[in-house]
Amino acid sequence: MPELPEVETTRRDIEPHALGQRIVALEVYEPRLRWPVPASLPARVAGQRITGTERRAKYLLIRLTSGTLLLHLGMSGSLRVLSADTPRIAHDQFDLKLDSGQTLRFNDPRRFGSLHFTLDPARHRLLKHLAPEPFEAAFDTDYLYRVTRGRRIAVKLLLMNSRLVVGVGNIYASEALFRAGILPKRQARTLSRAEVGRLVRAVRVVLAQAIRVGGTTLRDFVRPNGSPGHFRQKLYVYERAGEPCRVCRTVIRQVTQQGRSTYYCPSCQK
Ligand SMILES: [Zn+2]
């Protein structure tokens, strides 16, 4: 599933192709995404110019002269930069055609992605209640220490709670906990201040490293130019159950937490 680094990679990859371009047409082939794409959307965006791209949590924001498109990649979505005459393949859901002759083509086999238009992204229902970004100053040791106090929830599940911090999904929660030396099942309230500080740094480092190499491709994710992300080769624990720890050679273990797989090293993590 695309997480924060994959969405940020998508944003960085499309921006040079999108910035300043006029939208010739939005052609929707399958409006039944996670939420239906409104029938009025193509008319709203046609003729508008793209003035910028941003990311908030796992939403890609495409700023237009008037209004903003909000794209979520869902479970299996990818946005490609293609020549507009490239033949469509299965699961291509829409084309955002640009006057350069290129198109931003969204492919999403599972259709958990979404496309919205809003005049005020900060107040949009999908964005207005989001917690701090991991790279924002608001996500610091003081903040995470405060939200872990009194909470019995496993620290990995707390990290993945988007009401506390956005964009830390299953892959990067496991990887950050490994780098911080903390067992995923530890109750959040048992973390010392020093451990919380290590965890904040580890979350930022692991996300920044993943962005630098274009995200993680496990199954579905492809970059807008069609290439995979290369963070998979740098994973310490995720999907490495039964393999030796890259640090201490202990066998990596897998457990299930709320239906999701968690991976850890029983020696490196306490
Ligand atoms: Zn280890």
Image: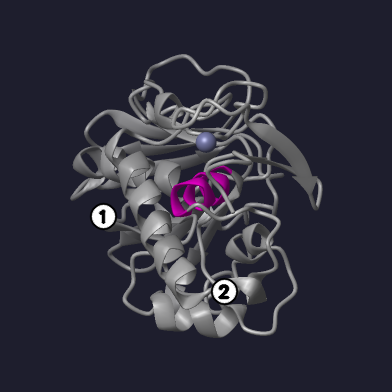
Q: Residues within 10 Å of mark 2 (few under 14, many from 20)?
A: some
Q: In this view, does 195 lie to the left or right of 24?
A: right
Residue underneath mark 2: 164
Mark 1: which secondary structure? loop
Q: Nearer the viewer, mark 1 or mark 2?
A: 2
Q: Does the residue labelled 1 lie within 8 Å of ligand 1?
A: no
Rendered location of residue 98, percent (x, y): 30, 38
> Which color scheme is applied?
one colour
Q: Residue at x 69, y 34 (%)?
A: 253
Which of the 4 image quadrants contains residue 191?
Answer: bottom right
Q: Kindly tell me whether residue 100 is visible in this rendering.
A: yes
Q: Residue at x 50, y 52 (%)?
A: 181
Rendered location of residue 235, percent (x, y): 47, 32
Identify the mark nearer the N-term, 1 or 2: 1
Residue range of the region highlighted in magenta in the rendering: 171-180
Whether residue 82 is in magenta: the answer is no
